[in-house]
């Protein structure tokens, strides 16, 4: 038995890859590439830099920035130093930012320079002692000959994490954390309430990486491109870290810019690509799509929100050489819980698949009793991938973890073979006239109209119906625009009368968070003002 406490940690994965393939390129961002040896050394320097500030194992360190090699190094450095990484959505400002930094008890913030003033505006009264550059502005990058960066508005000149990681002696850091210690506070998206900090120990994340490797067939020669935000658990924990664990060469982009995506897939012969449906949809409709050679692409993964079946069918028909994987789960489970593999899409295109390697599922009713196949119920999980609970939130932890199972809040149906199909979030089910209607079923019916680009269906409080089924619709540019009555008639031809929207509202876009998840609470607020 190994007596190395790092063996089952996030840090242990990188160390082993660096020993196996020291001279292979691990990560490329902008004009910089890091071999596995260089990345391993950079992580040690960055970890030493953070500990040199007086931070101690268990302290929380927030990362507040866009995708970059510095962001990836920051997570790995925290893991090596025993610090708890707190990823923060770079779009958060004001009270939302203050809440996350305060609720987590963050002591240090690693920020993109352009975002640092937002931290300064909210830090009064918080535990934040250090605000450091995550990376420098282009003029101040290492090797440019420019002065060291200072954070605008902070008055703190200082060495950025990327600069500290890039040169100097490699420190000896001791044994590092054990696999039972926290690696990250992974805040939920907060689509229905304030975000909760899921406490993720190293061992939970490593189990999640093994599940991802097995279910998604991730290989060292895949040539993956990652462009979805690393503050989100899918990009970081389902793709970046598992790919580094197997020694792949990862191309990292700052954001999912579609023209740049198309250029890099063709130019870099990308073989594996994960995108949220909110990016797959416009990519599939982009006017320059046919001008690019995407024949190198072999694996395409989607998740973080529901992919309309009509869009998936178009993508599969257009790219027959590509295997599509549906990834489903949530932050608390690392976040992958089920996968629908390419060979399973033909028979079950709407399914989210079966549980991954280290996840056990049940589908239960409100009393916790398992329901038979074909009956809607809440999916609950038992897994070593699960978080330990919610940070400083014992009541919410007790509500989510009952009798040894984590309650997801997702309403699903399981078939006889164990495949799950998402019906809805339990909180999004509509009670219309005393009958329950799944918003997703109505959305699929609306989406089948050729003029519809996006749709979201909610229940709006109504004196007659309890909740009136209401559809918010974004139309395709250039398509003949249907009227609300025509869309209602279209749905009526496909669904039972009580499921048909009582009202259709046309909008230019749907509100989403930076992870691509639809914010139905904002639609409910909007609808409350127009009844």
Image: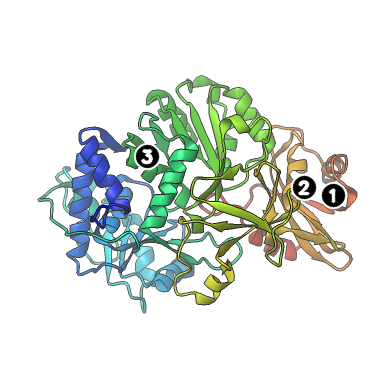
In the picture, which quadrant includes the C terminus? bottom right
The residue depicted at 44 percent of the width and 66 percent of the height is 97
Q: Is residue 523 left or right of residue 436?
A: left
Pinpoint residue 456: horizontal percent, then vertical percent.
Answer: 70, 50
Q: Would you name the residue on which mark 1 appears?
A: 500
Q: Is residue 191 above or below residue 292?
A: below
The residue depicted at 77 percent of the width and 42 percent of the height is 446
Image quadrant of residue 524?
bottom right
Name the foreground residue: 193 vs 434: 434
The residue depicted at 28 percent of the width and 50 percent of the height is 12
CB contact under 8 Å: marks 1 and 2:
yes
Residue 285 visible in the current orientation: no
Name the foreground residue: 122 vs 213: 213
Q: Earlier in the sequence, mark 1 or mark 2?
A: 2
Pinpoint residue 514: horizontal percent, then vertical percent.
Answer: 51, 52
Q: Earlier in the sequence, mark 3 or mark 2?
A: 3
Q: Would you name the residue on which mark 2 appears?
A: 442
SS at circle 1: loop
SS at circle 2: helix
Residue 377 visible in the current orientation: yes
* Label 3: few (<14), some (14–19) or many (≥20) C-alpha neighbours in 10 Å: many
Name the foreground residue: 272 vs 194: 272
Q: Would you name the residue on which mark 3 appears?
A: 243
Pinpoint residue 428: horizontal percent, then vertical percent.
Answer: 70, 59
Pinpoint residue 66: horizontal percent, then vertical percent.
Answer: 39, 50
Q: Is residue 126 left or right of residue 468?
A: left
């Amino acid at each position: 038995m190994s007596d190395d406490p790092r063996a089952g940690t996030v840090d242990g994965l990188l160390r082993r890859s660096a020993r196996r393939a020291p001279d292979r390129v691990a990560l490329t961002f902008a004009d910089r590439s890091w071999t596995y040896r260089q990345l391993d050394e950079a992580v040690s320097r960055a970890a030493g830099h953070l500990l040199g500030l007086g931070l101690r194992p268990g302290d929380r360190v927030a990362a507040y920035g866009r995708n970059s090699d510095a962001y990836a190094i920051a997570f790995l450095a925290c893991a090596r130093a025993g610090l708890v990484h707190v990823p923060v959505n770079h779009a958060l400002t004001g009270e939302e930012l203050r809440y996350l930094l305060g609720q987590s008890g963050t002591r240090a913030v690693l920020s993109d320079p352009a975002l640092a003033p937002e931290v300064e505006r909210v830090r009064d009264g918080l535990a934040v002692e250090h605000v450091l550059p995550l990376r420098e502005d282009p003029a101040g990058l290492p090797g440019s000959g420019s002065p060291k960066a200072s954070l605008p508005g902070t008055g703190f000149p200082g060495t950025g994490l990327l600069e500290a990681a890039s040169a100097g002696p490699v420190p000896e850091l001791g044994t590092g954390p054990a696999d039972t210690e926290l690696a990250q506070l992974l805040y939920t998206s907060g689509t229905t309430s304030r975000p909760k900090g899921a406490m993720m120990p190293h061992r939970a994340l490593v189990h999640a990486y093994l599940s991802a490797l097995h279910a998604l067939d991730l290989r060292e020669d895949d040539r993956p491109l990652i462009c979805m935000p690393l503050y989100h658990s899918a990009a970081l924990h389902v793709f970046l870290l598992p790919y580094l664990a197997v020694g792949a060469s990862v191309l990292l982009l700052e954001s999912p810019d579609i023209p740049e995506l198309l250029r890099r897939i063709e130019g870099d012969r990308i073989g594996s690509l994960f995108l949220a449906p909110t990016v797959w949809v416009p990519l599939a409709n982009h006017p320059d799509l046919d001008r690019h050679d995407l024949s190198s692409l072999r694996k395409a993964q989607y998740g973080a929100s529901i992919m309309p079946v009509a869009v998936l069918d178009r993508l599969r028909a257009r790219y027959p050489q590509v295997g599509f994987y549906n990834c489903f789960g949530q932050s608390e489970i690392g976040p992958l819980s089920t996968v629908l593999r390419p060979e399973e899409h033909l028979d079950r295109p709407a399914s989210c698949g079966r549980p991954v390697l280290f996840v056990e599922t049940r589908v239960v009713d409100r009393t916790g009793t398992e329901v038979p196949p074909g009956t809607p119920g809440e999916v609950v999980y038992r897994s070593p991938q699960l978080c330990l609970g919610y940070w400083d939130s014992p009541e919410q932890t007790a509500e989510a973890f009952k009798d040894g199972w984590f309650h997801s809040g997702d309403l699903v149906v399981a078939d006889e073979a164990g495949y799950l199909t998402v019906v809805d979030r339990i909180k999004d089910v509509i009670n219309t006239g005393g009958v329950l209607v799944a918003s997703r079923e109505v959305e699929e019916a609306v989406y089948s109209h050729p003029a519809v680009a996006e749709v979201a269906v909610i229940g709006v409080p109504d004196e007659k119906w309890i909740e009136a089924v209401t559809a918010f619709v974004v139309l395709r540019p250039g398509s003949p625009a249907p009227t609300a009555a025509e869309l209602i008639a279209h749905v009526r031809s496909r669904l039972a009368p009580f499921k048909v929207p009582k009202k259709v509202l046309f909008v230019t876009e749907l509100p989403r968070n930076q992870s691509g998840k639809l914010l139905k609470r904002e639609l409910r607020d909007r609808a409350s003002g127009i009844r």
